[in-house]
Image: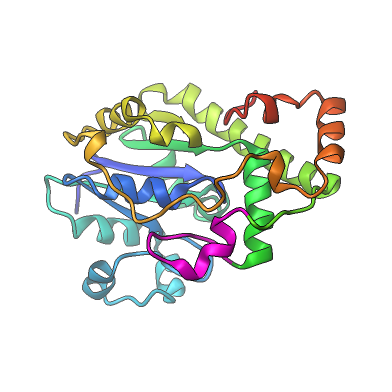
Amino acid sequence: MTTEKNCFVIITQPRSGSYYFKSLLDSAEDIVCQGEIFKQGVIEIDGYSSAKLGLKKGDITVRDSKPFAFVEHLRSLCTADKIFGFKAFWQHLTPHKPLINKIILNPEWQKIFLVRNPLQTYASLLRAKKTQVWVQKLGKPGQALASQGLVTVHFDQPSFEKHWAEYQRVCNKNHKLMAAQAGSCFEIGYGEMTDPARLDAVLAFLGSTANARQLTSEYQKQYPGALLEGFDNPDELLDYLAKQGLLEMVTLQKDIFA
């Protein structure tokens, strides 16, 4: 049995830079951060953990039969001086009541909420579906089409409104938990992941002695261009945002919207 202290979960949404953020934290000497271990259809854990647990990445039935025991077994592979964490989406946690009761509602488990401008995640999701390039690692020239900003996507009002509603639903859940457990929650925006001072604050929150400037990641940004340049109908998009009072998604490009 392992202690619940020195444990954390990154709660995020698709296309929020979570692979980059996870790998940054995992590069700290005193942190072990697994991937999306409750992903639908696959367990995102490293090869060492997979071998030690005797689990293949597709053994989701075993994982889901006793979800918290699975997390405990994974945590037990870390030495006592390591801080253990993993990333997750709300929709993959909520079907498992033990995870909600023993992790999310447990103030001894630290929660990091990683958020990103919903217009950016919307464009990124459309682009990933169009190109089938979901992540970009360093030194992967075969993925250049998506990374060079050559691919534009089309703004569609109904699909964006559905995306925007999901963003708001998730943020509301995050903020309710932050209000109830202020000391065990930390919110960081996508744009803050390149700010050493902000990353140092995350490390301090986790109790890590690492320095933000020493963190590394094998992932890189897929689309470096300006937000509006990524749409083939920017005028239609701007007209919609203006009517909805949401132009700050473009002008300020904030990550967190009330």
Q: Is residue 96 left or right of residue 77?
A: right
226 lies above or below 99:
above
Give the x, y percent position of residue 203. 27, 33
* Color theme of the render: rainbow
**Looking at the image, residue 224 lies above or below residue 209:** below
Q: Give the range drawn in magenta.
A: 133-149
Q: In the image, what residue occupies the spot 81% across and 33% down? A: 238
The quadrant of the image that shows the C terminus is top right
Q: Does the magenta stretch include residue 22?
A: no
* Residue drawn at 37 percent across, 49 percent down: 22
- Residue 137 coordinates in the image, percent (x, y): 41, 60
Looking at the image, residue 53 sits to the left or right of residue 80; the answer is right
Work out whether residue 64 can be spotted: yes
Rendered location of residue 15, percent (x, y): 56, 50
The residue positioned 62% from the left and 29% from the top of the image is 253
Instruction: Count the marks.
Output: 0
Q: In this view, does 53 lie to the left or right of 105?
A: left
Residue 189 makes an appearance in the image:
no
Q: Which residue is drawn at 87% across and 32% down?
A: 239
